Amino acid sequence: MTSVSQALLISTNESCAGLLQCMHDLLLSNSSALGLQTRKDFNDFKQMSTLYGNGAPRLLGPALLQLRVNATFKTTFEAIDPNNDSISFSLVKPIPAGAFITLNGQFTWTMQDPGPMQLVLQVNDQLSGSIFIPTLQVCKCASGGTCDYSIVIESYFEGKYQVVGCICPLGFSGTFCSSQSKPCQGEPCFPDVPCLNQKTGSQYTCSTCPAGTVASGMDGEKCFLYDLCLPPYPFPCHDNAECIRSNTSYTCRCRLGFTGDGKNCSDINECQSLYACPNAKFECINSPGSYRCSCLYKGVEDSQCGNSANPPGWNIFNCTVNWQTRNIASLQEFSKQQEKKVSCV
């Protein structure tokens, strides 16, 4: 560098733009082309070192956006850069209508078109960038329906665009609550009673019950015959009585085996009658509304009791007195003999 003139140094410095390696090669070879090639190679190497030594920024999220049609969604996207370079955000075309993001990641979207689509974001530093596609969960509920983001009913773009379910308010139905309920379709009224849907809610109105019937609860929904013995009227008689309808009134009558006025019924003890059982070989056992005759002989069926022989050891005597002509004294005697296991034959 000291062996050349000052003028040549100034000229070489201008040609090499101050790059020392370029000046050395130019002066040693006395070739401007070689010096300029050194300058180009040096600058290319520096640029490649900077480029390949740079780490691209990485977007952190949010990875899931829960959107509702015709409602404004807001969030902030975040990213990191391994070289701590300054970064900027942008949306990749085609940009969905209503979607917007600022350079620092402030995102807003008023979704108007609910058709399947993708949202693609890009984050850049000075040398490189990366893209990011979040998952979109879109709610299309109408009529005040509640979005149920736990239920996915449609899915597109390998799950990147999802349509979620709806919880419909009273009076509305359908996948997206767009259909007004028609409770009359379920025929809630009494047969042949007209049903009218209300304008709001899931209510309906039934016309009046047919002639000769009476309503229970809402008029026209449940209709009963005008019978004081039947619902919706409470049963007016005793539990052991039957109710007999007569025009607009009723009569209570105790059932067979009971006695009383129908309002109050008591059991008839048939065993108090001497004629309840065939003969004295039977024991009369009373029960509510009835009775039964049980053979006094052990091991003998009731059906064979009257024809059976007297068991050994019994004191046998003939009952020759007709049942209709027995006097009290003889009946008392029969009772005493029965206690002693004596049977009439």
Image (tube, rainbow, N blue to C red):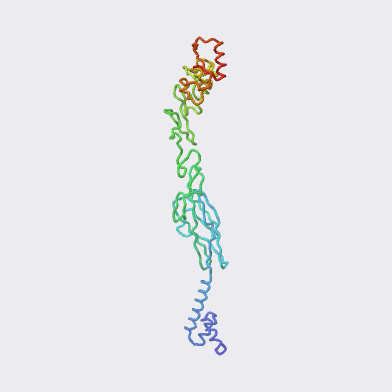
Locate residue 247, reporting x and y percent. 46, 17
Relative to 253, say whether 131 is above or below: below
Relative to 59, say whether 162 is above or below: above
Locate residue 333, reporting x and y percent. 56, 14
Farthest-out residue, front: 313
Query: Can the viewer see residue 62 in this picture?
Result: yes
Farthest-out residue, bottom: 3
Relative to 81, say whether 246 is above or below: above
Farthest-out residue, left: 192
Locate residue 125, reporting x and y percent. 53, 66
Residue at image position (54%, 85%) is: 9
Question: If the image is split into quadrants, where does the N terminus sit?
Answer: bottom right
Question: Observer-nearest residue: 57 or 206?
Answer: 206
Locate residue 294, reporting x and y percent. 51, 22
Query: Can the viewer see residue 252 in this picture?
Result: no
Relative to 217, say whether 41 is above or below: below
Q: In this figure, what is the number of numbered marks?
A: 0
Residue at image position (52%, 64%) is: 124
Question: Observer-nearest residue: 131 or 6?
Answer: 131
